[in-house]
Image (cartoon, helix red, strand yellow):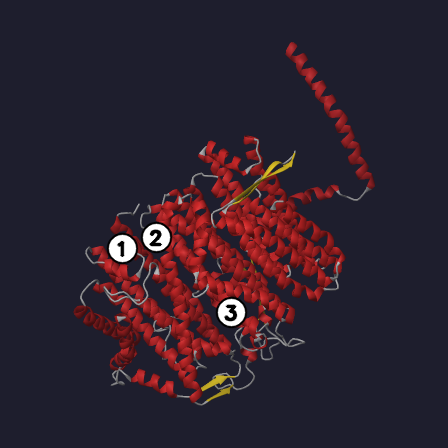
């Protein structure tokens, strides 16, 4: 419950911080950190235009997409407090429930019969497919290290002690950050601020969405950011009491948002044709984590 | 009067009557017959699942000796799956076959084969006499062949059918070899002899026997590299036949493997690694090729290979669990495999029936020509969508439950695993995840291009929704798919006996494990329900909001271009182009294209023909070389009568001369020795 509330809270200003960081980095003043949220509320109040080509799928997809993100958030624990949903192997559910949202967002893009949206859908399907093994290998390694298979228990028993564990923590953070960037279609995989449809991934999929639906999709992105931020934060606070963990959580989320902003300001987007290779390399980082865990457990050969 | 005779009487009576009825009655009689056989065989099966297995000893003949009919929990699970799929298949088939009602003789043969296939499958699951088993197996193979070649006037269908016939006989050959070996050693046809033999022989002997049986059954099940008949036979058959072929006939291979694992208690660890490896390869390879297919039914056929791979991963994990004495792993592995067997039979038959609806409406299953069909066939689109989500293993449907069980098997298995063991488990996580991701890519492609967007081809008549009779069995399946997704514990409970039979864990030991598993699995049900509720609530809120606001319809955003855009739509090939580029080194894609060039470019086109590399490597290429070798002897067939007379003369001369010469040499040698 705490994690759900906090993640929703953070989602209100996460993208705001990213945008603010980017503006400051490029020498502008930039909008307030709640501006993206205001935009979303405005969208909620607006009317919508639907394409004649679309069918029922296009109408339900944004809701299902949003619901899938909400479900995924419910799985996430907060330190010693379980998520609303917690059972053995819940991270499998986490990944698969996000996948169903993605399935619907892909087919809703195809529903418009537009060449641009088909293109975006094709890329989204491929990239998210390639990112999935990295997540599962990471969670598998952590499960092996801690001996548990649910988010809550894994994070509760994951402690820093040896040098290897620090290395693991850093690599796990890296993998989670990168997965988050891929899932949210941000730099270095996709540039949300590009103005050419041909080079977009996520943005081009939602070209035809408007009004409430667009608001849902945009806020789902905010929630997803906060959700991955919460996963990363969970790696660090173990079983600290609330008056420590909540500030740590907020600091980590802010740091995460600032680093996303910096990353987007100072890196260039990768070439579209090389994205697949790049994403697949993430799995090898996960494999490194796996071997690190083996070393810690003394199981290597 | 026992059940076996009752079933046989029903079957023979219907076989005798069917040829004399009109087209419609033929179907109805088949339905009646299939339902009665199902009821008769389900009674002992349900009993067996509740713990009371049936054992009958038929006196048999002098050749077969006594025929034991044993329906234990493992058989029961398969019998129930077979019965359900055959019933939905026949209900669907009756209205599907309306289009062919003029071909009366052909229909008789078709329905007769249908009944035979059903009975043979039930027999295979229950008969435990190797000779009778092989006979039933042969009846099943032949009747399936007849079912596939219903449109035998098309050369392509016939070719696919013959390919299937040959491959299924290779499978029978391997099985026969195994059974002969056992008969030679023990002198008994009873399956119990297999266990006695396996107990008495060396570990290596058991392993070889197991692998012999595994290969025989793997051809039927469609494990890579024994899968090559599958993508040919499925598209050739009528939709309901593809449904039952993919739904249960290939599963009988899985039944065989499980039965042999149960009987041959050998080095489970080695067998487990072997099955796991082959299954992961099957799973990944199947889905990798499925994505590239242009023919919907072929795509689904490759998906069957993928799902057989997933089932195999479960079996492999179960065996590893047995080998390392990890009870939880073996329970989870076998439950996952058995549940996925049922699940796959549900969603795959549903997918094939939907493909049948499309085929009968627009007379093509070429994905590239379809588009926007969902507007005219709303219910088929809905059914196909449910099945696609289920086959991708997404919650809240049944596919997720079985895949989740397999995943939790792996994640529970890694705790006390050795290094080699760990490598295999990590490899299977990687494989399963990749399979899941690729399946999503594949089914977004299939669903998106067939049902969504705007039409890509103008058909003579608009696609229209199939009739109600065809949709009844499909809705039946959907109900079961959702029930398993939301109330998985009931099915898990039904599985506990077959699983404890396979894993050899006594019920007392397995109960604590099973309660912990079913606690987790029941959570999945609740969570899936919660997901549906949340999605519904959000949709409801959205509905409230958008009704109160203005909304209008307009054309799709075309970046300022407002002309006709349906031709600019993404096609299925372009949707998977990025993937194809990645996978090309591993797969084998023939590409032909004419590019646009010059000031007045002509028509440009682009074709891709995905080929099966393993088929090329293991089947086509050796056959080609063998043919090439045999060509040397082609010169002998000159067509000249004198030459043939010469061959005859030479043959007779040799026949007479060789013994003579041999004698002479012998005397000569004797003479030389005496010197």
Chain to which the residue tagged by mark 3 belongs: B
Q: Residue furthest top?
A: B675
Mark 3 on the same chain as mark 1: no
- Other residues around mark 2 within 10 Å, as few (<14) / some (14–19) / many (≥20): many
Quadrant that contains the N terminus of chain B: top right
Chain to which the residue tagged by mark 1 belongs: A
The disc at residue A146 is: 1
- Name the one closer to the observer, B575 or B214: B214
Q: Is residue B653 left or right of residue B263?
A: right
Chain to which the residue tagged by mark 2 belongs: B
Could you say whether the residue bearing mark 3 is in a helix, strand or loop? Answer: helix
Could you say whether the residue bearing mark 2 is in a helix, strand or loop? Answer: helix
Q: Can you give x and y, in whole percent of width and height, for residue B76 in the image?
A: 52, 50
Q: Can you give x and y, in whole percent of width and height, for residue B491 in the image?
A: 45, 57
Q: Can you give x and y, in whole percent of width and height, for residue B614 in the image?
A: 54, 52
Q: CA distance from mark 3 to mark 1?
A: 39 Å
The disc at residue B385 is: 3
């Amino acid at each position: 419950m705490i994690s759900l509330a906090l993640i929703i809270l953070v989602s209100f200003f996460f993208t705001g911080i990213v945008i603010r960081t980017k503006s400051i980095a490029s020498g502008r003043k930039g909008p307030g950190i709640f501006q993206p949220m205001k935009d979303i509320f405005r969208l909620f109040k607006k009317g919508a235009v639907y394409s004649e080509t679309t069918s029922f799928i296009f109408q339900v997809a944004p809701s299902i997409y949003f619901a899938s993100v909400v479900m995924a958030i419910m799985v996430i624990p907060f330190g010693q407090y379980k998520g609303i949903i917690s059972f053995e192997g819940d991270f499998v559910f986490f990944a698969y429930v996000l996948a169903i949202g993605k399935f619907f967002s892909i087919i809703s893009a195809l529903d418009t019969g537009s060449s641009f949206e088909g293109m975006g859908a094709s890329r989204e399907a491929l990239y998210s497919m390639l990112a999935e093994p990295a997540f599962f290998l990471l969670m598998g390694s952590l499960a092996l290290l801690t001996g548990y298979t649910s988010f809550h228990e894994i994070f509760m028993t994951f402690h820093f002690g040896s040098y290897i564990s620090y290395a693991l923590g850093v690599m796990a953070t890296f993998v989670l950050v990168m997965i988050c960037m891929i899932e949210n279609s941000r730099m270095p995989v996709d540039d949300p601020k590009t103005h050419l449809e041909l080079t977009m991934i996520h943005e081009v999929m939602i070209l035809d969405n408007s009004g409430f639906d667009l608001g849902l999709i945009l806020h789902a992105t905010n929630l997803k950011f906060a959700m991955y931020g919460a996963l990363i934060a969970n790696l660090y606070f173990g079983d600290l009491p609330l008056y420590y963990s909540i500030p740590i959580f907020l600091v980590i989320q802010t740091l995460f948002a600032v680093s996303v902003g910096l990353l987007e300001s100072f890196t260039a987007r990768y070439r579209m044709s090389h994205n697949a290779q790049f994403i697949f390399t993430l799995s090898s980082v996960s494999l490194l984590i796996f071997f690190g865990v083996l070393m810690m457990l003394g199981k290597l050969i | 009067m026992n059940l076996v005779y009752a079933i046989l009487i029903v079957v023979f009576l219907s076989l005798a009557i069917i040829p004399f009825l009109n087209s419609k009655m033929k179907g109805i009689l088949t339905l009646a017959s299939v339902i009665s056989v199902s009821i008769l065989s389900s009674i002992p099966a349900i009993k067996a699942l509740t713990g009371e297995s049936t054992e009958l000893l038929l006196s048999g003949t002098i050749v077969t000796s006594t025929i034991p009919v044993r329906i234990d929990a493992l058989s029961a699970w398969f019998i129930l799956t077979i019965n359900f799929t055959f019933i939905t298949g026949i209900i669907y088939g009756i209205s599907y076959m309306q289009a062919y009602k003029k071909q009366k003789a052909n229909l008789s043969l078709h329905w007769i084969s249908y009944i035979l296939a059903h009975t043979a499958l039930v027999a295979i699951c229950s008969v435990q006499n190797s000779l009778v088993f092989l006979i039933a197996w042969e009846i099943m193979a032949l009747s399936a062949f007849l079912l596939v070649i219903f449109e035998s006037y098309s050369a392509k269908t016939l070719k696919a059918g013959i390919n299937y016939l040959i491959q299924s006989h290779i499978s029978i050959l391997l099985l026969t070899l195994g059974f002969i070996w056992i008969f030679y050693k023990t002198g008994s046809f009873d399956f119990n002899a297999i266990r006695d033999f396996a107990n008495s022989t060396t570990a290596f002997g058991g392993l070889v026997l197991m692998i012999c049986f595994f290969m025989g059954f793997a051809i039927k099940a469609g494990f890579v590299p024994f899968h090559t008949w599958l993508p040919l036979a499925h598209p050739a058959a009528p939709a309901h036949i593809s449904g039952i072929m993919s739904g249960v006939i290939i599963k009988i291979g899985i039944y065989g493997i499980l039965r042999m694992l149960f009987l041959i208690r050998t080095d489970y660890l080695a067998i487990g690694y072997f099955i796991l490896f082959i299954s992961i390869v099957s799973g990944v390879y199947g889905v990798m090729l499925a994505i590239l297919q242009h023919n919907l039914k072929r795509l689904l056929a490759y998906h069957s290979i993928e799902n057989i791979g997933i089932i195999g991963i479960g079996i492999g994990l179960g065996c590893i669990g047995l080998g390392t004495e990890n009870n939880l792993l073996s329970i989870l592995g076998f439950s996952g495999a058995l549940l996925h067997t049922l699940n796959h039979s549900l969603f795959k038959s549903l997918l094939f029936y939907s493909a049948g609806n499309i085929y009968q409406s627009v007379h093509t299953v070429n994905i590239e020509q379809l588009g926007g069909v969902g507007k005219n066939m709303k219910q088929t689109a809905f059914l196909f969508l449910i099945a696609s989500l289920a086959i991708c293993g997404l919650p809240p449907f049944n596919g997720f439950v079985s895949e989740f069980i397999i995943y939790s098997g792996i994640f529970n298995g890694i705790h006390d695993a050795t290094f080699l063991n760990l490598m295999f488990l990590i490899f299977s996580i990687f494989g399963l995840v990749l399979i899941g991701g690729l399946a999503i890519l594949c089914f977004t492609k299939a669903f998106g291009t067939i049902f969504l967007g705007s039409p890509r081809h103008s058909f003579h008549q608009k696609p229209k929704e199939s009739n109600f009779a065809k949709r009844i069995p499909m809705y039946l399946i959907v109900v079961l798919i959702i029930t398993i997704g939301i109330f998985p514990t009931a099915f898990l409970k039904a599985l506990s006996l077959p699983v404890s039979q396979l894993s050899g864990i006594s019920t007392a030991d397995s109960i604590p494990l099973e309660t912990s598993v079913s606690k987790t699995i029941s959570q999945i049900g609740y969570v899936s329900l919660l997901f549906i509720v949340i999605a519904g609530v959000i949709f409801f809120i959205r509905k409230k909001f958008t009704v109160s606001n203005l909304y209008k319809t307009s054309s799709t955003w075309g970046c300022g271009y407002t002309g006709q855009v349906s031709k600019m739509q993404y096609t299925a090939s372009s949707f998977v182009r990025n993937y194809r580029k990645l996978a090309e080194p591993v797969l084998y894609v023939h590409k032909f294209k004419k590019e646009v060039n010059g000031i007045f470019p002509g028509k440009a086109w682009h074709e891709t023909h995905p080929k099966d590399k393993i088929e090329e490597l293991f089947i086509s290429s050796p056959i080609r070389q063998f043919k090439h070798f045999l060509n040397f002897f082609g010169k002998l067939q000159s067509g000249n009568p004198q030459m043939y007379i010469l061959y005859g003369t030479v043959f007779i001369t040799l026949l007479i001369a060789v013994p003579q010469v041999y004698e002479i040499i012998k005397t000569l040698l004797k003479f030389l020795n005496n010197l």
